[in-house]
Image (cartoon, rainbow, N blue to C red):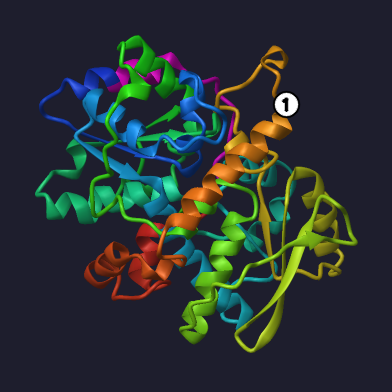
Amino acid sequence: MENIQVKPAKKLEVGIVEDLLKDPNKVVIVQTAPSVRVALGEMFGAKPGTSVTGKMVAALRQLGFKYVFDTDFGADITVWEEAMEFLKRLKGEGGPLPQFNSCCIGWLATAERTYKDLFSHISTVKSPIGCLGSIAKTYFAEKMNINPNNIVVVAVVPCILKKNENALPYNKTNFIYDVDYCWTTKDLGSLIKDNNIDFMSLVDSEFDNPLGESTSSGTIFGRSGGVLEAVLRCAIYWDSHTVYTNPIVFTPSSISPDILETEITIANRKVKVCHTGMVGVRKLVEMIRNNECPYDFIEVMSCPGGCIMGAGQPMHLPSEGITPLEVRKARISGLNDIADKQDRKISPLNQSIMKIYDAMFDGTAGSEKAELNLHRKY
C-alpha cells in the first residue's frame, strides 16, 4: 500500500474544478457521500441532522455539474463485493478471518503505519467513492458515448483524508483514476455561499440515474455500524436469498465498552461481529495476533460515530449551545430517518446495480471481472 500522508484541505482543488466546469470538452460529474446530506444544511441555519438532499442536488446543478450522482450507489456496490468476500472467507475460500472493512481511509492509514502484518485481513474492495467513480468511467462512459479521459469525477465527502485516497495509485480502473477531486462538506458549503445561492430556498432536485439509485444499506454507511449491518444483510441474502429485515442490535462487548458486538447466523454457522473505533481496534489487533479474537468481521471507523463526524463536516462552537455528542446523535438520527423511508433495505435489491453487473461483471458479485474494476491491491 502506498504511504498515506495527511494533506490539508486545499481551496486550490475547488478552484480547479470551477475552471473544469467551464471547459466544454469536460464532462464533470459529482457524487455526494451519505453523511453530507445531514450536515450541509448546518452551514445555512438548519439544525444538525436535517436532511437537505434535494437542495444539495439542486445547488450542485446550479454550480454547473453535468451529472449529480449519489455515493450511496457506490456504497451499495461496496456492500455487494464486501459481503461476497466475507462469505468466501467464512467458507475457507478467501483470506483469513476476521475480515476488516476497507472504506475508512483513516483506518487504512493507521493500519498501514501500525498493523501491516494484518493487511491480509482487510477487505480489498474499493471505497464507495472509488466504486462509483470506476463505474462512471466505464459503464456510464460507454452508455453515454463519452471518452473516459474527458470525464472528471468530483466527490463531496465528510473526510479530509479522502483528498489523499482519490490519488493513491491502486484507486484506478484501466489506468485512469476513479476519482479526480474531493471536496469536503465545508468546501461545498463555502462555494454555495460564494456564489450567492439561497440554499434553503432552493426547490428540491433528484439525483441522476442510473448512478443515483440506492437502498437504505448505502445510506447507513455514514454512521458507525452501518457498514457492518449492510454487509450482514447482503451476506445473508447471497447465502440464502432471504431478505433479512429484523433489527440488528449491537451490545457492548466484555472486552471493552468501545466495542459493540452481535451474533447472527450466516452460511449455517454462528457469526460473531463487532464495530469499533481507533481505541477498541488496538485491543482487537493484539487478540488477532495472539489467535484470541472471537470475531469474524470487524468494522473500524476512525471518527467517533463514523463519517457523520468527519473533519470535513461543519463544526459547532461551544457558544452555539450544542455539544459534539448532541451533533453526532442528531446526524445519526437524520441518516436513520432517511434509511427508514427507503423501501429497499438491502443492497442486492438495487436494480441499477443488477443491470450493471449483468452487463459488466458476469452477473455476480466477486467475479473475476468485478475484482479487476472494484477491488484494489495493497
- In the picture, residue 343 is in which quadrant? bottom left
Q: What residue is disc 1 on?
A: 323
- In the picture, residue 24 is in which quadrant? top left
- In the picture, residue 309 is in which quadrant? top right
Residue positioned 54% across, 72% down in the render: 245
Task: Note whether 73 is above or below 157 in the view shown.
Answer: below
- The amino acid type of the residue labelled 1 equals Thr
Q: Position of residue 363 (x, y in %)?
A: 30, 75
How many marks do you count on the picture? 1
SS at mark 1 in the image: loop
Residue positioned 47% across, 35% down in the render: 36
- In the rendered image, residue 351 lying in the magenta stretch gets the answer no
Q: Position of residue 14 (x, y in %)?
A: 36, 19
Please name whichever residue, 99 or 330, is drawn nearer the observer in this view of the structure: 330
Q: Position of residue 134 (x, y in %)?
A: 32, 51
Could you classify mark 1 by the number of other residues whose Cα lies within 10 Å: few (under 14), some (14-19), or many (20 or more)?
A: few
Q: Position of residue 152 (x, y in %)?
A: 26, 35
Residue positioned 47% across, 44% down in the render: 34
Q: Which residues are magenta?
A: 1-17
Task: Note whether 61 is above or below 281 in the view shown.
Answer: above
Residue 173 visible in the displayed image: no
Going by the image, does 25 lie left or right of 168? left
Task: Note whether 325 is above or below 100 in the view shown.
Answer: above
